[in-house]
Amino acid sequence: MPDQTRILAPGPNDRTVRSADGQILHAPANWELLPPGDAALTRRVKAAGPTWTIQEKKGRKVFSLGVWAPADRIAAIRAELASERSTDSYAKRRAADVARRERKQTEYVEDFRGAVLAFLDFAPATRSLPSDSPMPSRSTPRRSAAARWPARSGYRSNGGPSPP
């Protein structure tokens, strides 16, 4: 049984992983792969003992592919978490969390709108806007770049004079 927590890459087969030095390791028979998606379960499994975290790098991003850990530990923590999530106090706490996030989002939207209007204070059209009106739209449609800067005769498209 592995005695440490490691970060590894996926291996060539289902139950294999690749270490940083390129060595292929086989997952122990009593271990299973916990897929990503439940942060609380993953945190508790990692805290309970040795695990292998599988990560894959694509470009500049790193993607988690799951955590290898003993199957009996994953099952026990999953059952404990399910019983905890089924209580009334957990439901109340989740509802309070949702309400708090909604209040913070509303405050952010109001603050952002105020900052945009303060930034646009130099434009006369924004000085008389009430606080609940939408941002002003352009009264005249935009002209294309070609209409704003018509080509001059005797010049190429890159701005230089045409050859003689």
Image (tube, grey):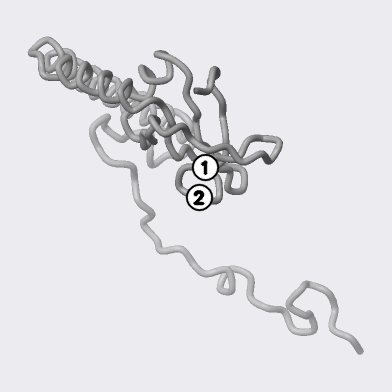
Considering every residue shown, the one lying at the far top of the view is 89
> Is 40 located above or below residue 19 in the figure?
above
SS class, disc 1: strand
* Amino acid on which disc 2 is placed: Asn
In the rendered image, residue 107, in percent from the top left (x then y), is placed at 30, 21
In the rendered image, residue 133, in percent from the top left (x then y), is placed at 25, 37
Instruction: Between residue 74 and residue 98, name the one nearer to us.
Output: 74
Instruction: Between residue 115 and residue 69, name the one nearer to us.
Output: 69
- On the rendered image, what quadrant is the C terminus found in? bottom right
- What residue does disc 2 label? 13
Residue at (40%, 61%) from the top-left corner? 140
Instruction: Between residue 23 and residue 161, name the one nearer to us.
Output: 23
User: Distance of mark 1 from mark 2, alpha carbons?
Assistant: 5 Å
* Amino acid on which disc 1 is placed: Thr
SS class, disc 2: loop
Q: Dots 1 and 2: beta carbons under 8 Å?
A: yes
Q: Where, by quadrant of the figure, is residue 60 drawn? A: top right
Residue at (48%, 35%) from the top-left corner? 27
Residue at (72%, 79%) from the top-left corner? 152
- What residue does disc 1 label? 16
